[in-house]
Amino acid sequence: MPIDAAGALAAAPRVREIRWDHKDVQLYHLGIGAGLPADDPRELRYTLESRLHVLPSFATVAGGGPPGVIAALSAPGVAVDLARVLHGGQRLRVHRPVPVRGRARAASRIVAVYDKGTAAVLVLRTEVRDDDGPLWTEEAEVFVRGEGGWGGERGPSGRPGPVPRQAPDRVVERAVREDQALLYRLCGDWNPLHADPAFAARAGFERPVLHGLCTYGAALKAVVDTLLDGDVDRVREYATRFTGVVYPGETLRVRMWRAAGPDEGGSVRVEAGVRERGDTVVLADTVVRYG
């Protein structure tokens, strides 16, 4: 079996130093579709360095290193074909607001390997801290098709339940540019699935697909802009499960339901789909918790 579960779990964390500044933040925001209209004051907080606020999902690309999927595949005990890999889910916990520029240490390790029968699931956890303490913790769930069936633990379901039956509090549509994946990959995710038609075909797709983490960022921006008054610092946690793909040129439709919570905080249930394909769901079991 190309995945040595015991070896992957026993490996020491990989620690690297990461740095970023306003240019990295601006590129990320443009990569997820910010900046339209270009003179809109609400968009300038994502694109103009003198007004810059950092959307917390920037944490997934901070430092320009490999994204969670690629990092998980380079972990000890893991040797699989990239074309058989899918990004299954992403979780982010923000300990402090992400600064516009920073220098930190990122420690990553495989914390779980699950046997789903027809696939293996790797959970890669990355903890980031600077001299003042923890900044954020993120987890990437990576599905490897054809690598299950060894009798290992299936793992928890961890789903938050179905979305509310009532009409959503807000519905936002975001057009995905034809070159959106080509722009987003400049943030550090060079997986050819998002640019090379031949590789995409080998992976079973009709053409290159948008990065799941690009959709992830775009959906969070929609929530922040419409339900959190544009205040990026209110986001505490953000989790999703990737259930489908978005093709560049399509339209992302984001539905949101707000729920009250303690301490003047709360949560937002989110579901994102593709308008042109009958609202086919691409982000499910999605929750944004805020303060």
Image (cartoon, helix red, strand yellow):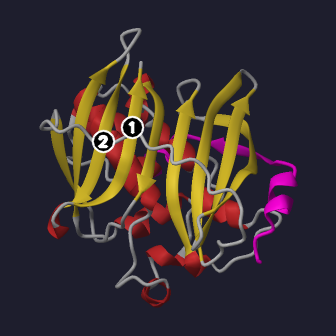
Give residue 160's quadrant in the image.
top left
Note whether 184 is above or below 130 in the view shown: below
Asked whether, in this view, residue 113 is left or right of residue 92, the answer is right
> Which quadrant is the N terminus positioned in?
bottom right
The magenta span reads: 1-27
Residue where numbered disc 2 is placed: 270
| Residue 115, position as x, y percentages in the image | 65, 63
Q: Are marks 1 and 2 in contact (CB under 8 Å)?
A: yes
Residue 289, image x and y in percent? 41, 28
Spot occupied by residue 113 in the image (x, y as percentages of width and height): 70, 57
Residue at the limit of the structure toward the left, as seen here: 167
Q: Is residue 67 visible?
A: no
**Disc 2 element:** strand
Q: How far, Cα to Cα, is label 1 from label 2?
A: 6 Å
- Mark 1, Cα crowd under 10 Å, few <14 / some 14-19 / many 20+, is many
Disc 2 crowd, CA 10 A, few/some/many (<14, 14-19, 20+):
many
The residue carrying mark 1 is: 287
